[in-house]
Amino acid sequence: MHLPDDNHSSKAHYKNIFGWAIYDWANSAFATTVMAGFFPIFFKQYWNHGVDATVSTARLGLGNAAASLVVALMAPIMGAIADSSGKRKHFLISFTYLGVLMTAALTLIPQGQWATAIAVYILGIIGYSGAVVFYDSLLPHIAPADKLDQVSSLGYALGYLGGGLLFAFNVFMTLKPAMFGLANSGQAVRISFATVAVWWAGFTLITILWLPADPKGSKMPFTQQIKDGWRQFINTFKKISRQKTIFIFLLAYWCYIDGVDTIVRMAVDYGISLGFESNDLITALLITQFVGFPSAIFFGFLGKRWGVRRSIYLALVIYIGITLWGASMKQVSEFYLLAVAIGLVQGGIQALSRSYFARLIPLEWSAEYFGFYNMLGKFAAIIGPTLMAITGLAAKRILMPPEPSAEQIRQISLTASRTGIVSVLLLFIIGGVLFYFAKEEKIQK
């Protein structure tokens, strides 16, 4: 797609781009306030009130794993259905409002009802993640080939800003509930879930109004579309396995984005292990969000001027430095600095990876191929934390003396946690090596 020459068409085109990018502003409220911020804490302290911490952690972990598995398995099939029917926007809207309804439903679940809470949360993640498949697949249809990096980065930048602004407001509301006429911080958290639902639903209306309508696609029954989608999924896998550049890039992306996701998901847990306060960890999360806004935009221009591959490698080198520094840090001030460093590169590597992949794939199969792309992103949330756990447990077993004192146990546990973080380096190194062989000019169609 190229920029139109006439003024009216040009304005309509930029309207389409902003309509697409604003969706990141809308849905990031769920990723930040619900997934990263309040749900894990509220799940443990309210819906698992009086339950052993190990049990509540296991319940949350299994819930996250179940949601990731469902999304990973359905993403490429749903992408194939969207390509065959042409209904990318339709599926984006459908999954979005599933997520919105489930987010709103979190405000109604009584104390102690952990099973209901985790079931609603899983459906919310399915809505959020399912919509992202179709959102990503629209990128090559909305942005001209020479603007892919900037448009992809614009989406991530707006996501960091929008998610961060609402999260900051919600954090303030939980710290000062009386200012808002609320009884306590627990009620403030419930209201925060409601604000996410309203924010997500409301700003998605801009996307609905400003994105072009789906082209006319298949009129066949949905059950037949599922069968055809499954058949197309198998064919897509065969095609990808023959397209070496795409296949190698997906393997590289799987590795290094696993490292990125592991650092994001495990940072709070690691900070707690180091003895940092929860307020410090929330503050660090906010820092990452607001640093991520200008940095994602900067990486879009950097990819244009310096090259996408060099920019991705720059982000990988910084992540290696973050990992090494994180393994040795001792002060909470260092945790804040690491939050800044993560914010500098997190959105950049995500945005440029998405735009790089968009260049590699056939336009007419974008949803199907992005289904695989997002599937690997979901499976990526499994390997890194598992690697950290195995490495940490092994280090603890090797270092633990026969009859340790309480202080020895504390120090060895801390060393084991640091060792686990170091193991994430392997993912960045393998991903970087594989990415070297995924050169754009070597695409085999």
Image: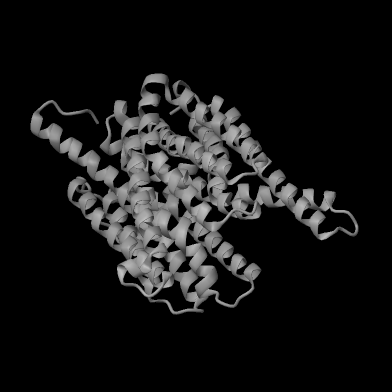
259 relative position to 362: left or right: right
Q: Nearer the viewer, residue 416 or 66?
A: 416
Residue 287: give x, y in percent of width and height: 44, 45
- What residue appears at the point 35 percent right and 33 percent down from the top-left corner? 297
Choose between 271 and 160: the one closer to the eye: 271
x and y, in percent, of residue 223 in the image = 36, 62
| Number of dots carrying numbers | 0
Picture quadrant where residue 363 is located: top left
Please say if 199 is above or below 363. below
Report the quarter where the C terminus lies: top left
Determine the residue positioned at 39% across, 57% down.
Answer: 30
Picture quarter containing residue 144? top left
Question: In this rendering, is residue 313 above or below 350?
Answer: above
Residue 270 horizontal side relative to residue 297, left or right? right
Residue 185 horizontal side relative to residue 269, left or right: left
- The answer to which of 335 and 202 lies nearer the viewer is 335
Whether residue 228 appears in this view of the structure is no
The image quadrant where one finds the N terminus is top left
In the rendered image of this protein, does residue 364 appear above or below residue 144? below
At horizontal 34% and vertical 53% (from top left) the residue drawn is: 27
In front here: 187 or 434?
187
| Rendered location of residue 307, percent (x, y) | 42, 22
Residue 62 in sight from this viewpoint? yes
Q: Residue at x 36, y 35 (%)?
A: 294
Give the colour scheme of this rendering. Answer: one colour
- On the image, the x and y values in percent for residue 318 come to 54, 31
